[in-house]
Amino acid sequence: MMVDASKMMPLLVLLLVGLAGECAAHECYVCSNQTGNTEKCLNTVKICEQGEDACLTEIRWGSTPYFSLGAQKQFYVSKRCAKKEICQRIRTKHMPYCTHIWYEDWTCSACCLGDRCNYYVISAAGSLGLSGTLIGMLAAFGLLMHRVLSS
């Protein structure tokens, strides 16, 4: 069965444009030791360096960095670009201390892929995988290919 090349060209262009966008540098929210996921952590975005393919979020629960008698515990949030391998290493390092026990100091971290994927702080975030955009594009391309080939 021969496939009409004129029907295939728009599909191929669509796929290549989508994949190029997926491979391009991405953006992460960035902040350092902010008291909560507010202000700077929600408004400051950085284009990641080449090779930094993940966004890393670290959440710390504890008292102020300096000793203060009777100091209240609070959240400290840090966000940045990172390489997937480094992100996973930090996540593994923090896992034993990610207890969420309110009267103890603890630290958790999360990694995600994709533009600005670290807007929300979710300490139970899943592990790294294919981004939803790429999976959706591949599924749409497969469906279109099936329709073209079966017509």
Image (tube, rainbow, N blue to C red):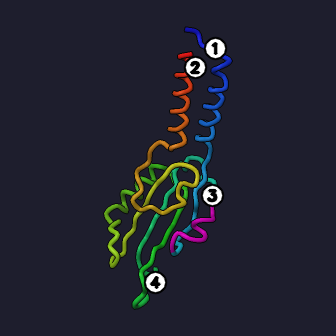
Q: Nearer the viewer, mark 1 or mark 4?
A: 1
Which callout, 3 or 1, points to the residue nearer the camera?
Answer: 1
The image position of residue 126, as x and y in percent, is 40, 52
Residue under circle 1? 4
Task: Inspect the magenta stretch and tell me whether residue 43 lies in it.
Answer: yes
**49 in magenta:** no
Q: Which numbered disc, 2 or 4, marks the residue closer to the eye?
A: 2
Task: Give the amino acid at mark 2.
Answer: Val
Residue at x 55% of width, y 36% of height: 137
Identify the residue at image location x=31%, y=63%: 96
Mark 2 = which residue? Answer: 148
Q: CA distance from mark 1 to mark 4?
A: 70 Å
Q: Earlier in the sequence, mark 4 or mark 3?
A: 3
| Magenta-colored span | 36-45
Image vertical order of residue 69 relative to residue 133, above or below: below
Q: Nearer the viewer, mark 4 or mark 3?
A: 3
Q: Quadrant of residue 105?
A: bottom left
Q: Secondary structure at mark 4?
A: loop
Answer few, some or many: residues within 10 Å of disc 2's Cα (few below 14, many 20 plus, some between 14 and 19): some
Residue corresponding to mark 4: 66
The answer for how far apart the CA atoms under marks 3 and 1 are is 44 Å
Q: Nearer the viewer, residue 41 or 33?
A: 41
Q: Residue at x 60, y 69 (%)?
A: 40
Disc 1 and disc 4 in contact, CB within 8 angstroms: no
- Circle 3: residue type: Lys
Gap in Å between the C-alphas at discs 2 and 1? 9 Å
Task: Sort mark 1 into few (<14), some (14-19) or many (20+) by Cα contacts within 10 Å.
Answer: few
Image mark for residue 108: none
Tell me the residue that label 3 is attached to.
46
Could you tell which of marks 2 and 4 lies nearer the N-terminus? 4
